[in-house]
Every structure is written in structure tokens, then in C-alpha cells.
Image (cartoon, helix red, strand yellow):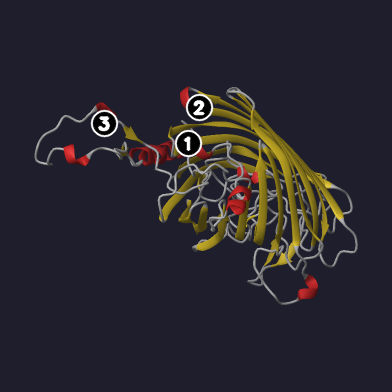
Amino acid sequence: MKPAIVKHLAGLAGVVVFAAVANAQAPVTVASTVGTDTSKVAPATTPVETPKETQRTSLLPPIVLQHFRALDKRGLNVFETPKDEGVAFTGFKIDFGAAFTQQFQGLDHSNIANAKMLTGTDGKPYDANKLIQIGHGFNNAVANLYLGAQLAKGIRVSMTSFLSSRHHNETWVKDGFLLVDASPFDVNLLNNIMKYVTLRIGHFEVNYGDSHYRRTDNGNAMYNPLVGNYIMDAFTTEIGGEVYVRANGFMGMAGMTGGEVRGQVTKPQERSPTYLLKGGYDKQLNKDLRVRLTTSTYNTAKSSSNTLYSGDRAGSRYYDVLENTVSTESANAWSGAIQPGFKSAVHAVVVNPFVKYRAVELFGNLERVKGKAATEPTYRQWNQYVGEAVIRLLPNEQAFLATRYNTARGELTGITNKVGADRFQVGGGFFLTPTVMLKGEWVNQKYNDFPATDIRSGGKFKGYMIEGVVAF
């Protein structure tokens, strides 16, 4: 057997072992016996035949926070945090969660760019358009830590930390916010208003579009049916507030933020607020059919460093593709993605249709954005289109097959013509338990119309990715 094939099989076996070990260590809790009359329970020293109801075990962690999207399989196809309470309020609660991923990468890349000689930090010349040599093997594991607390009825706080990521090897806080779904004062008028209204205040993942609810967020890849995110990944965290109104399947949202990942008060002449609007309809029409359609806008007139399309500080899942020989995994963390460079003004709009009929899911992303950096005199424009299909299989939708086509095209600074990329992904996965998933994909991406002086000229990468995920 050829050594390369042996290496590929070894990698696949390694990820399978990872998932199997995680499955073996999945939490098992005895079914709740709340409500049992303890005065009739025999002493611990007396052997008692356990009723069948209490012999059943659960592989699902209990949900103790209200208006909560589960981190595991139960969180699939959940978008905004639910307006339903989910669980009754019984007093202050604190809750922890975690998510981990590990990939085996089998990608190859190539380009036809002309040589571009530069001088490195060590004083030696190098070709900035020569691709770094990559092989097949494991990427570093990444992990998230979640902390939440129920402060009062309908009021909770949430914080997410990245324990490790591709771009930041050290631990850092991704976001933290207060979610209010009930009035803190027992006043009839306020109670009636809060039946329909939700407030989110703090540093949070801005609700632009629906794709950020289906993407991989560093250590948590449960919601993404494939491995990679979009070519233009509209995801960022900002400081501000959002107000939601929901009734009978209809939803409206208005928000305002500082327009940047980091809050700052210096250089006020370079900054202005960002305004978000979102509206849509989401309804389970019958037991077989659910439909959802939303449109979102994101608008900022000026910013010192806007990151709507560069806010994923965790980095891309496709390690080192189309990077040069002096690149590093952390410094060049967004391999395979295109960041349009709209650091100052951004005006974006996206439409997201979603249909789930029985076991079939269809999701779309139709996006147009224009923007510029502070030094640019005119706006540039990018369009991105995504179509995704998922088929859920087996009882409880334990397995799935998925495919996605993603194309993005627009204008970059320093390049006179329009450029872009096309990506095709196909794959599938299996839930070993509701908290443990193994999935894989075949990906093929091509870069279009980049000049010969750009490392992406004639660029392409393709191959397979296998990923194990644990989230609870």
C-alpha cells in the first residue's frame, strides 16, 4: 500500500478514535425523579427494585437557563434565541458548557502567480507568491467555554470564551451580554409588552443575516452541516443593543452598536454608530413543513476598523491554503476566505430563505455589500450567493448528507478588474450521541481573475476535511 494512502487512512482512524472516545465519555444522567414522595423511599441500606422509569438514562445535559439555544444537537435550526421560556424559573441558576473540535486535513493547493521577490524580517529574500508546502495531517484542536446565569425570570447573562483558536492560542473572551425576555418589575403593562419584546445589551454577535446561526464558531461546529464557513464570512461581535418584537411567526429587530469589535472613545472623528435592521417570518406551518424568510441590513458611515467580514478571530478551517512560504497558522489565519477590506464604511443587505420539509432542508444566502476603507474616495461592491441542501437520515435525524455552493465576486483595492472565488462542498455526518458528532466534506475552491502579480492568480485548493465535534 502506498505511504500516502496509509497516512490518509491513519488520519481518518485518528478522528474516528477521537469521536469514539468522546462518545464513551459522554455524560450520562439518571432520569429526574423530582416529585417523588421521599417519605416513602426505603433507606439506602435496603435493596429496592428500581422502577423502569428511573432506569432510563439521558445523554443530554439538562437545560437550566431560560430562552436558551442548546449547544448540542437540539440547537440545530434554531436562529434567534427562543421567545418561549423553555424551562420554568425556579431561582438563580448558573450553568457551564463547552465545545471542542479536531480536524484531519487532506487538502492540496496550487497557483500560477508570477514570482514576487521581497525581503523578509530576517533580511533574506523570498518569493511572496510561492505557496507554502502543505501535507495531510491533524490541525490543532480548538475549544470554547460557555458561562451563563439566570438572574431573574426571563433575564439571563451569557459569556463565551475561546480557550484556544487558530488565530489566538491564548484564552480570550469572545462576547458577553444581558438577555431580557421579561419585565424586572411586576407591572401589568410591562409584563404584557415583554410577551413580545426581547432586549439584548452588551458585547455580542451582531444579528446580521441568518448564516451566522449555521456557521462554525471556533470550538462549536454542531450547527454547521459542513466543515468550512463561507468565502465571505459575515460575522463579528460589537458593543451595543438590539430590540426584538416577535408575534405569530413575524419578527422585527432594530439595533445599534459602536461598529467595532473593541470599544474605544479616541479619534471620534473616525467613528460613527452602526445601525442594524432585520425582519422576517418563521413558522412551522404543519408537522412536515417549516418556512423562514428574513432580510437584514447593516450600515455604518465610518469606522476606524470595521470587521463585519473579518471579525472571525478564530480563523478559517482550511489551514495554510494559498499562503506563502513565510506565513504562519496564526498570523495568516483566514486561509481560503476573502476579506473585502471595508474597514471604514459598510452598507450590507442579505436575504436568507430557509425551508425544512420533513427530512430535507434548503438554505440560501443572497448578499450585496458596498464599502470602502477610510483612504478610498469611492465605494467598492461585492456580491455573494450561497445555496445549501441538507438531508437528515435515520431515526431522530441521527445522520445527514449536505452540499453547498458558494460564489463571491467583487472589487479589491489595487486590482482594476473584478475578482472572486467559487467553492463547492459536499459531505455528511453522524451524531454518535446528541453531544458528539463526526462529519466530513470534500471541498473544491477556485479563485477567479486575480492578476498574475497576486498569489491567488490561478489559485485553487481541493481535498477532504474530517472533523470530530463535542458540545454540551
Answer above or below: position of 290 versus 145: above
**Mark 3: which secondary structure?**
helix
Q: In the image, which disc is placed on residue 55?
A: 3
Q: Amino acid at mark 2?
A: Glu
Label 2 environment density (alpha carbons within 10 Å; few <14, some 14–19, many ≥20): few
In this rendered view, identify the residue nearer to me: 46 or 78.
Answer: 46
Answer with mark 3 or mark 1, whichever residue precedes in sequence. 3
Rendered residue at 81%/48% (across/down): 382
Q: Residue 459, located in which quarter of the rendered image?
A: top right
Q: Is residue 202 visible?
A: yes
Identity of the amino acid at label 1? Leu
Give neighbour class at mark 1: few <14, some 14-19, many 20+ (Cα, 10 Å). many
Residue pointed to by mark 2: 397
Check whether the beta carbons of the residues at disc 3 and disc 1 lie within 8 A of each other: no
Name the spot of residue 310 as percent of width and height, x first: 69, 56
| Image height of 201 relative to 457, above or below | below
Within-10-Å neighbours for mark 3: few <14, some 14–19, many 20+ = few
x and y, in percent, of residue 367 in the image: 78, 43
Horizontally, residue 173 falls left or right of residue 283, namely: left
| Label 1 element class | strand
Q: Which residue is mark 1?
A: 438
Give the CA separation, mark 3 to mark 1.
28 Å
Q: Which one is closest to the eye, mark 2 or mark 3?
A: 3
Q: Provide residue 230's location: percent of width, then percent of height.
A: 67, 44
